[in-house]
Amino acid sequence: MAIEFVVQRLQIGDVILIDLPDGSGQGEATVARAIERSDTEGTVRVELRAEGVPEFVREWAVDDRVTVVRGP
């Protein structure tokens, strides 16, 4: 079951749907480390891991929403 919620609520182990950085389309990525919140910029940085892709960091606005397909 997929649930959409605010990106700042992500936790280590959550699996989200995302456009992969290698241009191969949309896939699943796992939150690899605790998210970083920037109060001054209003952003959230998330380190993600996806099969066949090196770990990468994605940045969103604090109130952006993501689709979580599995929790930790």
Image: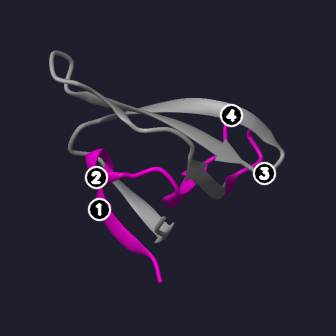
For the residue carrying disc 1, how many other residues have a C-alpha within 10 Å: few (<14), some (14-19), or many (20+)?
some
Magenta segment, which residues? 1-26
Q: Which residue is mark 1?
A: 5
The quadrant in which residue 63 appears is: top left
Q: Which residue is mark 4?
A: 55
In the displayed structure, does residue 8 sit left or right of residue 59?
Answer: left
Q: Is residue 18 above or below residue 68?
A: above
Q: Are marks 2 and 1 in contact (CB under 8 Å)?
A: yes
Coloring scheme used? one colour
Q: Is residue 26 above or below residue 70?
A: above
For the residue carrying disc 4, how many other residues have a C-alpha within 10 Å: few (<14), some (14-19), or many (20+)?
some
Marks 1 and 3 sit apart, C-alpha to C-alpha, by 23 Å
Check disc 3 and give the amino acid type: Glu
The answer to whether one can see residue 29 in this image is: yes
- Reading the chain from its start, which is encountered first: label 1 or label 3? 1
Per the image, label 4 sits on a secondary structure element best described as strand
Instruction: Check residue 51 in the rendering and tell me which mark sits there, or answer none.
Output: 3
Marks 2 and 4 sit apart, C-alpha to C-alpha, by 20 Å
Q: Are marks 3 and 4 in contact (CB under 8 Å)?
A: no
For the residue carrying disc 3, how many other residues have a C-alpha within 10 Å: few (<14), some (14-19), or many (20+)?
few
Q: Position of residue 14 (x, y in %)?
A: 49, 59
Q: Which residue is mark 2?
A: 9
Check disc 2 and give the amino acid type: Arg
Per the image, label 2 sits on a secondary structure element best described as helix
Q: Residue at x 67, y 36 (%)?
A: 21
